[in-house]
Image (spheres, rainbow, N blue to C red):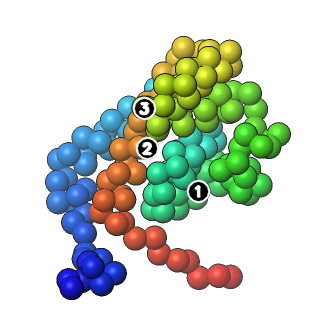
């Protein structure tokens, strides 16, 4: 029985550190997407909600940690962050946010054609074409970063309680 079979996980290659040129290109793309989102008029809170929802779906602890802190800095509330995974069952998100979250989920699950069509129809009612494009790009970008962190097993370190 090897270490992996025994439940021990071998240290992963941090692909961002191992291939810095590729990671820098991803980071540059993410900066361009932030600009696109800002130019489309998307509030930073909405961008962070999309980042968080996609990271929840993908199970990326590292990105959840990073973007929870970013959302709080952007003024997001603990209540909304706490219910984000069940956003459809709440009344705390606006029509624009609900459309963006649905579109982000559809972007994260591209093989689900029904989900895509429903999300796109909802997006058309609540988002401009620039906003739709920006939300899709934000979702695509965080999906890519999720995969880098998941495959690298980037650690989430605790902070002392106060």
Mark found first going from the N terminus, 3 or 1 = 1
Whole-number angstrom distance, CA of label 3 to CA of label 1: 28 Å
Seen as rendered, the residue at the extreme right is 91
How many numbered marks does the figure carry?
3
Q: Residue furthest front?
A: 1
**Image: 99 above or below 30:** above
> Which residue corresponds to the image point at 33% horizontal and 35% vertical from the top-left?
29
Label 2 crowding class (10 Å Cα cut-off): few <14, some 14-19, many 20+? many
Q: Where is residue 111 in the image (x, y as percent from the top left)?
A: 42, 32
Report x, y in % for residue 52.
Answer: 56, 49
Question: Which numbered dot is residue 142?
Answer: 2
Residue that numbered label 3 is attached to: 111
Quadrant of residue 129 within the rendered picture = top right
The answer to whether 94 appears left or right of 36 in the picture is right
Dot 1 corresponds to which residue?
68
| Secondary structure of residue under mark 1 | helix
Reply above or below: 69 against 102: below
Q: How far apart are marks 2 and 1 (CA)?
A: 13 Å
Whether residue 150 is visible to the viewer of this picture, yes or no, is yes
Question: Which quadrant of the structure image shows residue 22?
Answer: top left
**Which residue is more in the foreground, 107 or 97?**
107
How far is disc 2 from disc 3 in space, using C-alphas? 18 Å
Q: Residue at x 61, y 32 (%)?
A: 102
User: Cβ–Cβ below 8 Å for labels 3 and 1?
Assistant: no
Can the viewer see residue 48? Answer: no
């Amino acid at each position: 029985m090897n270490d992996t079979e025994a439940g021990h996980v071998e240290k992963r290659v941090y692909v961002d550190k191992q291939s810095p040129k590729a990671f820098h290109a991803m980071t540059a793309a993410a900066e361009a997407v932030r600009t696109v989102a800002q130019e489309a008029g998307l509030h930073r809170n909405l961008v962070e909600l999309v980042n968080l929802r996609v990271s929840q779906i993908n199970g990326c602890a590292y990105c959840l940690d990073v973007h929870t802190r970013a959302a709080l800095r952007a003024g997001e509330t603990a209540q909304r962050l706490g219910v984000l995974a069940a956003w459809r069952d709440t009344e705390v998100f606006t029509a624009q946010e609900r459309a963006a979250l649905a579109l982000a989920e559809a972007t994260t699950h591209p093989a689900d054609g029904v989900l895509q069509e429903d999300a796109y129809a909802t997006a058309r009612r609540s988002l401009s074409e620039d906003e739709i494009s920006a939300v899709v790009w934000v979702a695509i970008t965080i999906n890519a970063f999720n995969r880098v962190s998941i495959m690298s097993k980037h650690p989430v370190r605790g902070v002392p309680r106060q």
